[in-house]
Amino acid sequence: MDSTLPLLEEDTTKGVLSLTEQRLITSVAKKTLQIPPVVSRAAPFHEFHRQHKKSTLGEISSRVDPEDAATIIFPNSKEAMYGTYFSSKGNVAPLPPSSSMASAKKSKPVRTYPAQHLESELQVPAQPQLPQMSPCQSLQDSCFDGHIAVYHGTIDKRAPGFLALKQQHCSSWGSILSFLEHTEKLLKDYAVPLATINCKKLAEVASGFELNENPTKSDILSVIKNQPSVEKILNRPGQRYKGQGGIKMAATKIQAAWRCHQARRASVRCRQQQWASGVIAASWLLHHHMAHVKKSLKESRQRHLENFYIRAKHLAANWNRIRTSRRTIIHIPSLGYPQCVREHIPDLALQQNTQMGRLCDILDANVDVIYICPLHLSEELLRYYNKLLGLQAAVRSGNPEDMGDLQDRFKILTPEATNSFPQHHMCLATQLKYSPKTIKRIKILTQSRDAYIIGGVPHQDDLAVADMLNVPILGSVPEVAQLYRTKSGSKRIFASACVPTPPGESDIYSHDQLISVLSQLIIDNMEVWCWLFKVNNEAGGNGTAYCDISYLRCYHWAQEECQRYSPEIWSQKWAHEPALVKISQELPGLLAQHVQPVNEKRFPTWEKFLQTFLSQGGVIEAFPPSKNITNLTVDMLIEPTGEIKMVSSGDQLHAEGPLRSSGTTIPQRSVDPTVLNALCFKIGETCKSKGVLGYFSVDFVTFIHPRRTEQQVWATDLDLCYSDQLALTQLMLYVTDGNLDCRSSHFEVSLGAKKMKTQLMSLLSSPSPLSNWCAVASTQLRHSSLSGTYYNALFQMCKARGVGFDLQNNRRGSPGGPPDLCSQSLHHPSRNITT
């Protein structure tokens, strides 16, 4: 702005006004231009005749050029044409005539309309008569008005208001003109029929814009006087497509929307494909990883199984030497039930620790015991068990001072993984598998000597632990044990052994099968009034339910029908078909109302029991048709050499009901030993042929048949594991120094003290120092307040009430306390007591 730029020739021909607007020269610069900016000539003045005034009532042009939308042309003479300007306020002003007839001829052809039609179209009050005024007066009035009308987006460049605005703001006319061009374009684009521009506001707004700067819509609307109506038109949907280039804009919009739709659909499809490819890739990686893990697990388990058979073969070949030489027995009382069963066992660690009587295997002087305990023991309990196991010498001599210290003969180890997985319901073998420190310590304790494992309920991780320790297992393969320890599997063993079993059916997996099988069993055994339902994988009576079918409305009628026919005729289908149909119809309702689960906490309703029963499978068997029944358990051992032994037997005690054992009396006295031995050895031979090895127990039920009046013995259950009764038998033999002959069901105890032996010999006519005894053992005695009692206080209370171990008076009872008191910490609400 401070220096003058050199001008080009083409710039000098445009005039001084153009140079000034472009700011190429200042207004005070002295320049000589070829074309003078102003040409002087006379300005013609014309008179306004009355005839012209009257002609306003005539006809006017019907077609106006878009550029002259604000001017109405009136014909007057052959030499000139006059016009009238209509402002937005309805004012009418005459326009000066053109300079010659040529200008009139150059204008576009016009068509005349009546004045009334023009007034209705432009909404301007009709002017019956125009006042006479000079052109200068018209220009001054337009300037005073200060508004410019825009019809259909076109500004009349010859309108007085436009000319007055141009004359007043000639210095910034370039910005104003550019602003007006953008205004015209906006109004044409949206087909706005009429807009009024405020010239004063226009000058203020346009002065802030440069020539190449585009105003916004809000800037344009700010200079329009009728802004609300114009803005309403601009915001009307689809209005843009009614103005200039509307069809093209509509087509462009449609194409853009369609392309956007296609692009969005392609984008969505692409994202879906990317997501699907990601899911497929992740699934494939997961599948590949799972397949790799499964393959490695399968290979490791196959390797564990092969090593198990190799070590079992070595154990069988050297069993006669191992059982008479120095050896270590590793006891792992693990309950390797399926996960669905372990999750519903309350206090799983407590249930796995009810067999601490296994420590009494140190009765054999060549045996050292490593006992894996699922709970951490306090120092007080460790001292108690050390003292208890040291009673052996005192029992034999009858002198309490002969108590020994056998702490180096047994070790109680707790896997460190018990702290890492407190809520995972893992069996003890799995916890030991993930306890490398305990595994390492066991290896140190068993090195350079023979050792083998005696487990609990077999599990796959038993083989893994045996492979880590490189020691054999005196037990069955987990697959074999899991197959034949189920209720249905035990029925197959009993059927192969040809031993008597309760009437019933196994492998029930559907509701229709249950109803049809039970209906037929009721028809075939009308003397049976109660039927049992047993879930395959459950144990201890937890998966058992019973139903009294005497509640059937047709039961007594069916019994009468059965008595009408002989047994041969009743077995015919035509004879019992009506009763079978009625029983089948009534059974679903009867089961829903009268089935009673043994463990009501686990199965509060029949529906819940039925769901578990059908998912795991189960058996239906008859309850003995007698009011006086006796259950008994026999523990068997199949040695690696194939020799079968009976190691324990006992009659069950039932405190909570006839279907749940609360303890045993050792040995059994309810069945003739000869009959019982025959049944047990038949079952043992069958188990051996199926690949069963190690310890297992068989449950029987005996009763007097009401019609035949003879004793019946039924085999009811088979459990392929080390039982609680066997652990208690080991404890009983240890603390009494007795001898249990299971073949004759005799428990013989020697008289310890020489003084007592002499006294009894003088009193008894028989010279034998032995007598027949019976022991009562239980792991189910519980007391809710025992958790808050110190063990020393408990022992003092037992001693005050005569419960104890008295060597001098030869009284046999609880040796001062239970071996499984250690099964829970002091804060647990219940404890087990073994007597």
Image (cartoon, rainbow, N blue to C red):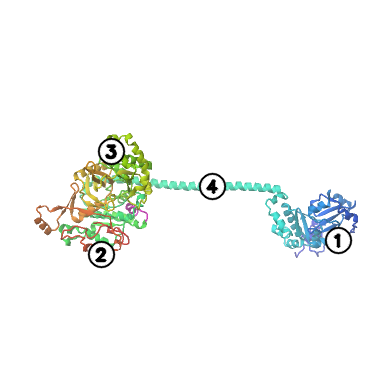
| Amino acid at dot 1 | Cys
Tell whether position 305 is magenta: no
Mark 3, secondary structure of its residue:
helix
**From the viewer's perspective, is the residue at label 4 or at label 3 nearer?**
3
Q: What range is drawn magenta here?
A: 423-434
Q: Earlier in the sequence, mark 3 or mark 1?
A: 1
Q: Between label 3 and label 2, give the one nearer the viewer.
A: 3
Closer-to-camera residue (702/10): 702
Q: In which quadrant of the rendered image does the C terminus lie?
A: bottom left
Task: Check contact, mark 2 vs mark 4: CB within 8 A.
Answer: no
When the figure is inspected, residue 394 is found, relative to residue 642, above or below; the finding is: below
Q: Earlier in the sequence, mark 2 or mark 4?
A: 4
Q: What label sits on residue 136 in the rendered view?
A: 1
In the image, which is nearer the foreground, mark 2 or mark 4?
Answer: 2
Q: Position of residue 514 (x, y in %)?
A: 35, 42
Tag 4's secondary structure?
Answer: helix
The residue type indicated by label 2 comes to: Ala
Amino acid at pointer 3: Gln
Which residue is more in the foreground, 588 or 441?
588
Q: Is residue 668 at all visible to an observer of this figure? A: yes
Residue 60: x percent and y percent?
84, 51
| Disc with the residue nearer the chain's start (1 vs 4) | 1
The local crowd at label 2, few if under 14, some if 14 to 19, many if 20 or more residues have their Cα within 10 Å, is few
Q: Secondary structure at mark 1?
A: helix
